[in-house]
Each structure stands twice: as C-alpha cells, then as structure tokens.
Image: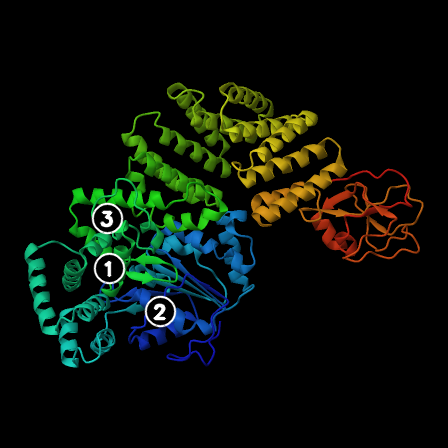
C-alpha cells in the first residue's frame, strides 16, 4: 500500500477508519519518538514490521506498545480498518483475529468456527476486499513461529511489538531504546504540573531512573499526586535502591524501575491502603484488560480487606481512580476495564510470599467464577471472551475448588459453542491432566470435563477417540455415581451420538431406546434431557429408514420442547423443528415439509440471526428459497403448452426461466413483489435443484418460487431433489 503524501509525522490524524477494533486509548503524554515513528512509517509500507527493544533486551517498559498505539491514532486516517490483537497468549490470537470476520462481510465465528473464520479473514485481507487499506497490530508477541500462520498477506500493513529480538530474522525491525535525555525531560515537563519541576531536576531524575519511560511515568505520577519535591524523591529513591541492592535479590528488571515502583506503592498505601490490596489482586489476573464488573459482586470466601472494599462501591471507585492517578493501572472508562502493566504485575507478585500467592489466586478464581454467566449462549459470549484472557494466567486449572472447576468446564463449553475446537481441546486436556493428578477417580467435575472433551473431539471428527472417552466415562459414572446421575445420562446420550457418527445406526437406535426408557423410569424433572433423547431416537429411526416412526417421535420432541420453551434453549427448539420438517419430507409429504421448513427458517432468523449455524442448517435442509436449496417452477412432462424451460439432466425436471410462462393465462401479467400472483397460479409441490445450477439460469422466476405451476398445466407434478 503506497503512502499518501499527507501521511507525515505530526500531521492531522484524519477521519476515523470504518473499522476501529480494540485500539487502546491514546496517551496524551506521549513524547518524542519522532525519528522512530518516521522509520516505522517508512518501513511498514514495504513489509511486516516488528517493534523490538534495543539496549534493554528482555526489559519491559521501554514504550513499544505506546509507540504502536501512537502510530495507530496518528495515521488512522490512512486506513479503512485498524485491528488490535493482544498476542502475549498465543492461543488467544486466533479468536481475536476471527472476531474481525463480521466487519469484512463474513459470517460470524459462531457460524464457521474459529479456524475457518481465521482463514476467511486472512483471505479477505489478502484480496483487499472489502478493505485494501488495513492495519493489524499484534501486541507483545513472543516467538515468530507462534504467529507465522496468522500473519496476513496483501497490500495492508502488519505491525508487531515484541521483547524477542528473534523477529529481526523474519521481519523488518525498529529497535526501541529508552528515552533520550531530551525526551525524558520533555516527558516529565508534560507529566508533572507546570513549574513543579525544573529542567535541571528533570535531568537528574531521568539520570537516576535510566530514562526508562515506565519508571519516569511512575515518578511523574507520584510527584503529581503527592507534591513531593524532586530532592526528596531522589533521596527516597537512593534509599530504596541501596536497600534492593543490599537484599541481593536477582531480578530481570532495572533496579531503578523497582525502586520507583516501590515508592509509588508505598505512597499509595499511605493515602488509600485498600487500593494496594486491589492492585495486588490485579497482579494475579492476566495482563489484558480486566472487566470492571469483575469487582462488582463479593463472592463467598473472599478474603479481607478485599471483600470489604468490593462491598463498598464508593471506596472501590476511589481505589480504582487512585490506581489510575498513580499510574499503577490503566483505567479505560469507555470499555470499563482496569489494566495493570505486566512488568508491574511481575514486581507485585515477587513481593508476595508464596503462601500468600496461593490465597491471592484463590481470590481471583472466586472473582472470575462470580463474574461468569451461569450458562453459555450467544448473549453471554462476549463476557466469556473477556474472562478467557485471564483463565491461563490466573492458573484456573490448578484449583481444586468444585466451583472453579465448573467454571473452567463452562469456558470449554463456550469455546466449543463458538467453534474454537483447538483451544477448547488444549484447555480441557490441561485441566484434566491437573485434576486427575490429585483427585480420586469418579470426581463429578472430572467426569463433566471428560464429557465435554468427548464433545470437542467429536466436533474435530475424532469419532473413535470420542467413543472411547464416552464409553469409559459412562462405565465410571454409572459404577461410582449411579445410572440416574446427571453426568451418567449425558455420557449415555453422547455415546449414542458417537455410534451414529461411526455409522453404527442399528446399534445407536437400540442404545437410544434404552436411554429413553431409563429417562422415563427415573421420572426426572428435567424434561429437556428427556426430549433430547426422544429427538435422538427419532434421528435414529430416520437413519434406519423408518420415516413414519421418526416423524412421530420428532413431533413429540418438538411439542415437548415448545411446551417447556422457558427452559429449553432456542437452538434446541429450532433443531427439533427442522428435524420434523425433514422427517415429514422423507415421508413424502412435500408441500407440508415446505411450509414447515419456511417457518423453521423464519424462526431461526428472528431468534438467532440468519448466520447462526442452526439457522443455516435449517435453510440447507428445508427446500426453501432462503436456504441452501432453491425453489423453482417445474412443468409436468405432459403439459399441453410449449413452456419455455431448461432441462436438469440429473433429475429430469424442467425449470422455467421465463416470466410469465407461456402456459400462463394470456390476460394475466407477472406478479409484482408486493402483490399476490394471478389467480391461475397455485401452490403445489416443486422441483429442487442445487444452488450452483441455479446461478447459471437465474431469472426473476427464482425469486417467485413460492408460486408454482399454472392451472392450465395438467398432470401431477413430482418433487425432484438433488
């Protein structure tokens, strides 16, 4: 993508791009870096560009992310799409990239699954459709191999920030050093109130802090909030530095940074001590933004004084505000999030004894559990996506609390629902490995984890592995907990699905019949589970060519779901209704199947959106003009009129390609989109052909497929399907 002449350093930011995704707020105190920004702007036009640290190899806080944020805001007018992708957790790169799909005119990730959505997004970016001027920013990436398959090609721009100098071998790099002394002085003059610091004091302070931007931010915030003089600050800094050196603790961070951070925390502790407790808690979350709502409710068992702080919204708001004012956390009022720099998180964790660290993690686990929705559904996906960023950093899998393990399983269920099967598999395998190491056989949460593990494997097409897990899980659940236990019944239902997936239709039918008998014998209050089994049994009869019985059972399942609609998820109702339409069609009642199919599709569009996978399945299964098949006119072979048509060789049907057909009444005219067709047109069964065939003969007749065959034609039309 060529650069416009107006794209100069310091120029106007320009209009907002059409797609502006997840870009952090601009830093009003951003200082200097003009030469680096100029190099970055020139280099990014030719190839993938990585921003890496230079002199401080491995150090954080030199301003790599701030440079990327400034670049995005400064040059946003030259792009139609800008998208921010946190990359410190490689497993979260794909979901963030896949979330771009709807903005490119693609179906959402829930329709295609994460892997397919990522492929479609990368293809759209490569082709420049619908946006040729795009910028993707991968923040805090580590190993180049972890991003290689997710870097788009094309005329847009890719920017990567990283602490790993290995990027120099695979991308053009712009090395970021600490501030120059002039930049440090300029920054402090911006950060500290006017006339509160002289150039000489700023120079001495910058020298003591090694010109490290994050340390200067800490010092400037402390002076702003407390009014401490530079001389006093330098004296305290010397004392802290000497203390740190005397302790002899090995650290990967600059001593000056650690000393500056300690001064800020000590000062905050004197002013608002509960804010430090909140800050320590945030250190055990992930480095990504923490939803503000995580701190709204007080879960049972939360330690004091954190529990007391969260129960007082006024004190909590003040504590969060102080964290922002002391530059110890970034508070974003637009997204309502709290974010602590990973370097500050690491320094905070280092100060907490190991025994206390475990208690802090337990508190974080309780907060995540309390903030999670009770179940997974389209309306809760965004919340689970926000919480997912903290599952691995908070070591959720290490907990032996049943509530936390149930939350972990719900996260796996969410990933399965949105189609991110690879991440779901990795997480559930990690959870099960940790849980089975210290928990007795037959633990309910382990069994639930294995049940969802089998679901994920089945979705990945590993039917044999899913069958083995379901079979062993069913045996364990029935032996230890009893056949009537909830997870045992789930394993039993899953085993039936495994048998059908493997092609063992007769065995699956017998298995589902036994499962239904067991559900009825137990007389459970959970009617949803019972009708799920009825639905599965109907499917089994259909696969064994007993269409009449399949229709009867499918109708029973659908009516049962509708009767209990307040407790039955909409996708389950839609699935049962669509299966009923299919069973009716297989019984030969084509007109009725058409009517049901149209209602099913309309229900899916209204309740779940047209892009939901169950709605798309309904459109594909039912012979509907809005689905995968296309309704068209067909004439019986003995029509006395010479109707214009084209022959479909695979079905023998003749498809009209002219409106009005020659067999229509001479006085009638073609119906408009807002009027009913002429009286000599009536609803009858119709022919169905694949959509790819219709593309070559598409005319207005396709749009008017609801009305088929004129009454002049004689004979009985037959439905054709391909």
Disc nearer the start of the sequence (2/1): 2
CA gap, disc 3 and disc 2: 34 Å
Q: Which mark is residue 308?
A: 3
Quadrant of residue 334 in the image?
A: bottom left
Q: Is residue 503 visible?
A: no
Q: Quadrant of the C terminus?
A: top right
CA gap, disc 2 and disc 1: 25 Å
Q: Nearer the viewer, residue 607 or 26?
A: 607
Vertical position of residue 544 compared to residue 173: above or below: above
Dot 1 alpha-carbon crowd within 10 angstroms: few under 14, some 14 to 19, many 20 or more: some
Disc nearer the start of the sequence (3/2): 2
Vertical position of residue 350 compared to residue 488: above or below: below
Secondary structure of the residue carrying tag 2 is loop
Q: Nearer the viewer, residue 134 or 238?
A: 238
Numbered disc in front, either 3 or 1 = 3
Q: Is residue 315 left or right of residue 106?
A: left
Disc nearer the start of the sequence (3/1): 1
Q: Is residue 179 visible?
A: yes
Secondary structure of the residue carrying tag 3 is helix
Write down the residue under mark 1.
58
Q: Which mark is residue 157?
A: none
Could you tell me if the residues under marks 3 and 2 are in contact, i.e. CB atoms within 8 Å? no
Q: Position of residue 591 (x, y in %)?
A: 76, 38
Write down the residue under mark 2.
26
């Amino acid at each position: 993508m060529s650069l416009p002449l107006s794209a100069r350093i310091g120029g106007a930011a320009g209009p907002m791009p059409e797609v502006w995704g997840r870009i952090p707020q601009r830093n009003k105190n951003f200082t200097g870096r003009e030469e680096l920004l100029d190099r970055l702007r020139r280099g990014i036009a030719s190839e993938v560009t990585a921003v890496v640290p230079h002199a401080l190899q491995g150090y954080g806080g030199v301003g790599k992310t701030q440079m990327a944020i400034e670049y995005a805001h400064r040059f946003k007018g030259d792009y139609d799409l800008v998208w921010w992708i946190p990359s410190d957790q490689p497993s979260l790169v794909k979901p963030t990239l896949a979330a771009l799909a709807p903005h490119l005119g693609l179906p959402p990730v829930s329709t295609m699954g994460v892997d397919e959505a990522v492929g479609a997004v990368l293809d759209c970016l490569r082709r420049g459709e619908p946006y040729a001027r795009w910028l993707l920013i991968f923040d805090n990436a580590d190993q180049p191999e972890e991003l290689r398959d997710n870097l788009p090609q094309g005329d847009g721009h890719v920017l990567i920030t990283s602490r790993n100098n290995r990027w120099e071998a695979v991308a053009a790099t712009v090395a970021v050093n600490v501030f120059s002394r002039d930049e440090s002085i300029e920054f402090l003059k911006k950060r500290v109130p006017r006339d509160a610091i002289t150039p000489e004091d700023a120079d001495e302070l910058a020298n003591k802090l090694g010109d490290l931007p994050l340390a200067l931010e800490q010092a400037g915030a402390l002076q702003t909030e407390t009014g401490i003089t530079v001389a006093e600050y330098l004296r305290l800094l010397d004392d802290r530095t000497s203390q740190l050196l005397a302790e002899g603790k090995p650290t990967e961070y600059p001593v000056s940074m650690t000393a500056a951070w300690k001064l800020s925390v000590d000062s905050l502790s004197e002013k608002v001590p509960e804010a430090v407790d909140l800050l320590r808690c945030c250190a055990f979350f992930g480095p990504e933004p923490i939803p503000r709502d995580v701190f709204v409710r007080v879960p049972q068992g939360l330690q004091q004084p954190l529990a007391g702080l969260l129960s007082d919204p006024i004190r909590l708001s003040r504590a969060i505000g102080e964290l922002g004012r002391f530059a110890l956390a970034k508070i974003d009022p637009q997204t309502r999030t709290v974010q602590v720099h990973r370097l500050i998180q690491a320094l905070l964790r280092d100060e907490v004894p190991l025994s206390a660290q475990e208690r802090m993690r337990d508190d974080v686990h309780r907060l995540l559990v309390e903030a999670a929705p009770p179940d997974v559904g389209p309306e809760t996906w965004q919340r689970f996506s926000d919480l997912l960023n903290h599952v691995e950093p908070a070591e959720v899998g290490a907990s032996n609390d049943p509530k936390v393990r149930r939350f972990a399983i719900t996260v796996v269920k969410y990933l399965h629902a949105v189609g991110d099967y690879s991440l779901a598999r990795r997480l559930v395998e990690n959870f099960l490995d940790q849980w089975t190491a210290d928990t007795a056989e037959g633990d309910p949460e382990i069994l639930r984890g294995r049940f969802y593990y089998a679901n994920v494997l089945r979705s990945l097409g590993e039917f044999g592995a899913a069958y083995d897990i379901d079979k062993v899980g069913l045996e364990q659940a029935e032996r230890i907990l009893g056949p009537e236990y909830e997870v045992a019944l789930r394993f039993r239902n899953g085993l039936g699905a495994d048998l059908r997936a493997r092609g063992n239709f007769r065995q699956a039918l017998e298995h589902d019949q036994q499962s239904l008998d067991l559900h009825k014998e137990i007389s459970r209050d959970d009617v949803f589970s019972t009708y799920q089994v009825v639905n599965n049994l109907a499917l089994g009869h259909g696969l064994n060519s007993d269409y009449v019985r399949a229709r009867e059972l499918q109708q029973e399942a659908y009516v049962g779901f509708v009767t209990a609609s307040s407790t039955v998820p909409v996708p389950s109702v839609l699935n049962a209704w669509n299966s009923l339409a299919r069973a009716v069609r297989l019984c030969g009642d084509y007109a009725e199947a058409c009517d049901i199919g149209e209602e099913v599709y309309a229900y899916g569009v209204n309740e779940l959106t047209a892009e939901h996978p169950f709605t798309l399945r309904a459109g594909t299964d039912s012979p509907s003009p809005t689905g995968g098949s296309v309704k068209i006119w067909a004439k019986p072979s003995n029509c006395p009129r010479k109707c214009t048509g084209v022959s479909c060789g695979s079905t023998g049907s003749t498809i009209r390609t002219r409106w009005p057909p020659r067999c229509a009444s001479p006085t009638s005219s073609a119906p408009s989109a807002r009027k009913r067709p002429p009286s000599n047109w009536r609803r009858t069964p119709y022919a169905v052909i694949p959509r790819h065939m219709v593309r070559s003969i598409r005319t207005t007749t396709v749009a008017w497929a609801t009305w088929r065959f004129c009454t002049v034609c004689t004979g009985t039309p037959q439905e054709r399907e391909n």
